[in-house]
């Protein structure tokens, strides 16, 4: 069984270092001339997948924008995941789940067990009940070749009060998360399957990301103010492990598929240039 880290490493080598989010919020559906309902959601997703699903390494649907339509919206999410798999893109489901015991195990089964209709390559997770509380998610991912991206340093202003709080051992909460994920990836080749989420707009944080040996998802590029050139400031020596993530910068170019592809190629070229500078 191939690990998620190995699949991601190959996908980035073949398609380039880029993750594109699918965030069908009401304003975007309206801007595309679509109705803010399940039919509009489905049309939006089919258009995005058919336009870029065969040329992007990772696509990241945001689960909340599907869940708001109830069971039918989740059905569209299931269909979108299947379509992305058919187009050869890795699917990272942005759910930011985090809980304890049997509940986190159930989340793991929902997203990381191949028998589930919501099965994806990787998920995002929240560690703020303790990184150890996510153990069932890590073990399910390892069993089935999946991945988990754990929140570490997010760009929302409220995050700093928790993530940069200093514990008794002198480490920040974020550094503790970073260190524990690094342990999970120890010895993995060519890349560990457990990653971190670090916002592209957080600037220089003084945190050590150099030993993670796993992917570093960098959301916040484009419309949220982050730039590929600024990634060096955030990640330093860990820059080669960064997976840049765009959403509105690409999706806002729709609904014409050609425009979506052009926007994707433009941001991918920017990312290649910025990350290539680390070689």
Image (cartoon, rainbow, N blue to C red):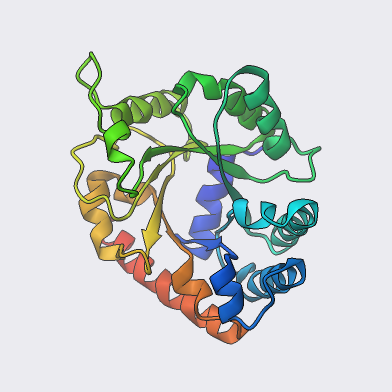
Q: Is residue 217 above or below residue 116?
A: below
Point out the image quarter for the C terminus: bottom left
Residue 58 location in percent, x, y? Answer: 56, 57
Left or right of residue 101: residue 240: left
Q: Position of residue 225 (x, y in %)?
A: 30, 65
Q: Nearer the viewer, residue 185 or 201?
A: 201
Image coordinates for residue 127, horizontal then vertical, percent: 46, 29
Can you give x and y, in whole percent of width and height, for residue 71 in the image? 79, 51
In the image shown, does 142 or 170 lie closer to the viewer?
Answer: 170
- Figure check: 106 above or below 203: above
Residue 10 falls left or right of residue 121: left
Q: Residue at x 55, y 79 (%)?
A: 260
Q: Residue at x 31, y 62 (%)?
A: 226
Which residue is at 39% across, 28% downward?
A: 182
- Indicate the quadrant where residue 170 lies: top left
Left or right of 81, for residue 172 = left
């Amino acid at each position: 069984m191939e690990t998620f880290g190995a699949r991601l490493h190959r996908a980035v080598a073949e398609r380039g270092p880029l993750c594109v989010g699918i965030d069908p919020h009401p304003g975007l559906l309206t801007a595309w001339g679509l109705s803010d309902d399940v039919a509009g959601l489905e049309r939006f997703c089919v258009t995005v997948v058919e336009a870029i699903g065969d040329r992007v390494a990772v696509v990241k649907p945001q689960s909340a924008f599907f869940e708001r339509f109830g069971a039918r919206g989740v059905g569209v999410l299931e269909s979108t995941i299947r379509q992305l798999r058919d187009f050869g893109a890795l699917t990272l489901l942005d759910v930011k789940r985090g809980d304890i015991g049997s509940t986190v195990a159930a989340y793991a089964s929902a997203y990381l067990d191949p028998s589930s209709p919501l099965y994806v390559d990787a998920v995002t997770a929240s560690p703020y009940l303790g990184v150890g509380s996510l153990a069932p998610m890590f073990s399910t991912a390892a069993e089935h070749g999946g991945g988990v991206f754990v929140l570490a340093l997010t760009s929302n202003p409220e995050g700093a009060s928790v993530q940069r709080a200093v514990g008794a051992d002198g480490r920040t909460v974020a550094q503790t998360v970073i260190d524990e994920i690094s342990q999970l990836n120890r010895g993995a080749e060519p890349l560990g399957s457990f990653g971190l989420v670090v916002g592209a707009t957080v600037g220089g944080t003084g945190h050590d990301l150099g030993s993670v040996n796993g992917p570093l998802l960098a959301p916040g590029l484009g419309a949220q103010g982050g730039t590929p050139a600024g990634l060096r400031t955030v990640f330093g020596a860990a820059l080669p492990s960064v997976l840049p993530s765009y959403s509105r910068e690409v999706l806002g170019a729709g609904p014409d598929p050609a425009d979506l592809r052009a926007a994707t190629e433009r941001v991918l070229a920017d990312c290649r240039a910025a990350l290539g500078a680390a070689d």
